[in-house]
């Protein structure tokens, strides 16, 4: 029986590829890639000629049984996404669930990830944190989701596309209040890497000319249970986490 390897890839800087990630991609029988053309460039950069098969959100259900069959037949398979950690706002979750349910060995490799990379340089409390990823795109759903996190007593990490940054930061200021502290990290590991720190009101300026990829981090709420939409445990007041 083969092993399923989960292999993180760079989020902008090719030098962030680990030696183990290169060795793994080179030695497996097959690479299940979100975008085989994109991963093809990475493979050619490192002189890897392992065969690829596409594995993305639109063919997940069809591919899983195929990949499981190959694993059962003894093939070692590495799963990669376009950037960063597989399964983190990326394809992979269902494959891992299916593989573990089938008793197949799943081996994760550590490596690049935008959320954690942003968090450790944010200056916001790194513990506890909640990784949210992409918010709903529809304005009403986004506002409702954010409203349910107003008192959430953990640093919150969001991913956002450049063309939606302004709208999302404006909604965050509306919902969390303009004086809530936040940090916007842009183009991590790349030439124009940049951190902007301030209140949500101040950070609106960051969205004036959005370029590249963004992580938004919002300081913890007060942990006060305020109603049915709050996700803190019922009837508790959670102590404010470490000040910024
Ligand atoms: N799997 C990836 C990870 O482990 O971070 C995330 C993939 S998700 C489809 C892409 C989003 O991650 C982008 O829209 C952006 O919010 C964030 N991101 C990825 N690379 C980034 C970078 N270099 N700088 C800032 N944010 C980045």
Image (cartoon, rainbow, N blue to C red):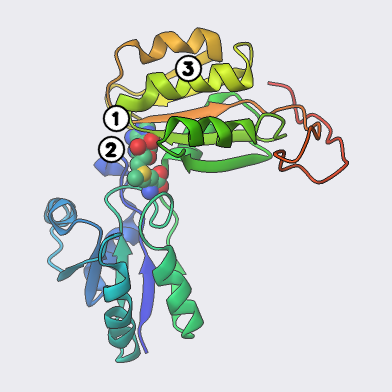
Mark 2 Cβ and ligand 1 under 8 Å apart = yes
Q: Which numbered marker is on residue 170?
A: 3
Residue at 29% across, 79% down = 67
State the CA–CA distance, disc 1 to disc 2. Answer: 6 Å
Query: Crowding near pointer 1: few (<14 within 10 Å), some, many (20+)?
Result: few
**Residue that carries the numbered disc 2 in the rendered image:** 12
Secondary structure at numbered mark 2: loop
Residue 51, x across and y down, in percent: 14, 71
Secondary structure at numbered mark 1: loop
Residue 33, x across and y down, in percent: 24, 62
**Quadrant of residue 72 within the rendered picture:** bottom left
Closer to the chain start, of discs 3 and 1, is 3
Closer to the chain start, of discs 3 and 2, is 2
Closer to the chain start, of discs 1 and 2, is 2
- 206 with respect to 27 (left or right): right
Residue 94, x across and y down, in percent: 42, 68
| Viewer-side label of 3, 2 | 3
Q: Quadrant of ligand 1?
A: top left
Query: Crowding near pointer 3: few (<14 within 10 Å), some, many (20+)?
Result: some
User: In the current view of this chain or complex, which residue is farthest to the front?
Assistant: 140
**Residue that carries the numbered disc 1 in the rendered image:** 190
Asked if labels 2 and 1 touch by Cβ distance under 8 angstroms, the answer is yes
Q: Which numbered marker is on residue 36?
A: none
């Amino acid at each position: 029986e083969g092993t399923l390897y989960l292999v993180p890839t760079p989020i902008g800087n090719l030098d962030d590829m680990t030696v183990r990630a290169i060795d793994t991609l080179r030695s497996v029988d097959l690479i299940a890639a979100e975008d085989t053309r994109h991963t093809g460039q990475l493979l050619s950069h490192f002189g890897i000629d392992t065969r690829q098969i596409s594995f993305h959100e639109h063919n997940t259900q069809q591919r899983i049984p195929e990949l499981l069959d190959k694993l059962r037949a003894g093939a070692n398979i590495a799963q990669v996404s376009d950037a960063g950690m597989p399964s983190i706002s990326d394809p992979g979750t269902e494959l891992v669930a299916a593989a573990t349910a089938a008793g197949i060995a799943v081996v994760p490799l550590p490596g690049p990830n935008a959320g954690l990379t942003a968090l450790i340089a944010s200056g916001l409390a790194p513990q506890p944190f909640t990784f949210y990823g992409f918010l709903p795109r529809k304005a009403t759903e986004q506002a409702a989701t954010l409203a349910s996190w107003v008192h959430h007593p953990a640093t919150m990490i969001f991913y956002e596309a450049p063309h939606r940054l302004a709208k999302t930061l404006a909604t965050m200021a509306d919902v969390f209040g303009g004086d809530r502290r936040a940090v916007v990290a842009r183009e991590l590991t790349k030439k124009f890497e940049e951190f902007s720190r301030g209140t949500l009101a101040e950070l609106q300026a960051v969205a004036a000319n959005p370029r590249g990829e963004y992580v938004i981090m919002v300081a913890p709420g007060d942990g006060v249970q305020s109603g049915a939409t709050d996700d803190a445990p019922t009837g508790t007041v959670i102590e404010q986490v470490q000040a910024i």
